[in-house]
Image: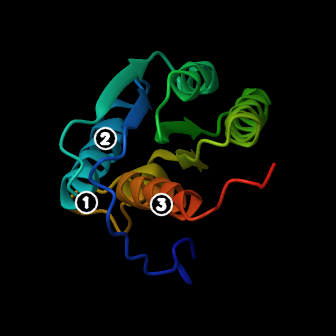
């Protein structure tokens, strides 16, 4: 079952972080839940003015994340959902989005909260969307992971030169 074994993260001293949320538009009900969870998490952390951008679909998340990283954001949260269909499209989109976001994070050093649901059906996506009847809140979790990583990176000393 997804969600078992997740760490309980405590994040402090992050109110001054510049955080952006980039969210796809496909599957509106699921996306509304993910965005609400992300914004709620940011509010709980004291990050009162995050940037929220919407893109057409999950495939567009990496390019916007790259631009935001280059423009000085401390953490980025990518939210999307891809539902398996009857063609290999699911595999290509999931692989492209995952690799693209990973590449942005590694190349820029800016943490990206991965809130992209890759589900077999609508029921699985709704159960992870953070809606009142959902079992999980992946938007909230993605924010917490990105912000926790950004605060960890603050503790890394600059190299001696």
**Mark toward the start of the polypeptide (2 vs 1):** 2
Q: Position of residue 24 (x, y in %)?
A: 45, 27
When the figure is inspected, residue 125 is found, relative to residue 101, above or below; the finding is: below
Residue 87 at least partly seen: no
Residue shown at 49% from the left, 36% from the top: 80
Q: Are marks 2 and 3 in contact (CB under 8 Å)?
A: no
Q: How many marks?
A: 3
- The way the protein has been coloured in the rendering is rainbow
Tell me: 110 left or right of 159: left
Q: Position of residue 81 (x, y in %)?
A: 51, 38
Nearer mark to the viewer, of 2 and 1 = 1
Residue shown at 58% from the left, 47% from the top: 111
From the image, tell me which residue sits under label 3: 151
**Mark toward the start of the polypeptide (2 vs 3):** 2
From the image, tell me which residue sits under label 1: 45
When the figure is inspected, residue 144 is found, relative to residue 68, above or below; the finding is: below
Quick one: label 2, few (<14), some, or many (20+) residues within 10 Å? many
Nearest the viewer among 79 and 68 is 68
Q: Are marks 1 and 3 in contact (CB under 8 Å)?
A: no
Nearer mark to the viewer, of 2 and 3 = 3
From the image, tell me which residue sits under label 2: 35
Query: What secondary structure is found at the residue carrying circle 1?
Result: loop
């Amino acid at each position: 079952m997804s969600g078992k074994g997740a760490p309980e993260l405590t994040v402090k001293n992050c109110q001054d972080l510049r955080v952006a949320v980039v969210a796809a538009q496909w599957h509106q009900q699921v996306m509304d839940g993910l965005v609400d969870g992300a914004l709620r998490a940011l509010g709980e952390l004291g990050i009162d003015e995050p940037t929220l951008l919407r893109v057409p679909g999950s495939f567009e998340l990496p390019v916007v994340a790259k631009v935001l990283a280059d423009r000085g954001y401390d953490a980025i949260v990518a939210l999307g959902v891809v539902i398996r269909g009857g063609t290999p499209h699911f595999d290509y989109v999931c692989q492209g989005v995952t690799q693209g976001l990973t590449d942005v994070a590694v190349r820029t050093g800016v943490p990206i909260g991965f809130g992209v649901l890759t589900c077999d059906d609508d029921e699985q996506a709704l159960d992870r969307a953070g809606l009142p009847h959902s079992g999980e809140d992946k938007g909230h979790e993605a924010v917490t992971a990105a912000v926790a990583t950004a605060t960890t990176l603050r503790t890394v000393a600059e190299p001696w030169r």
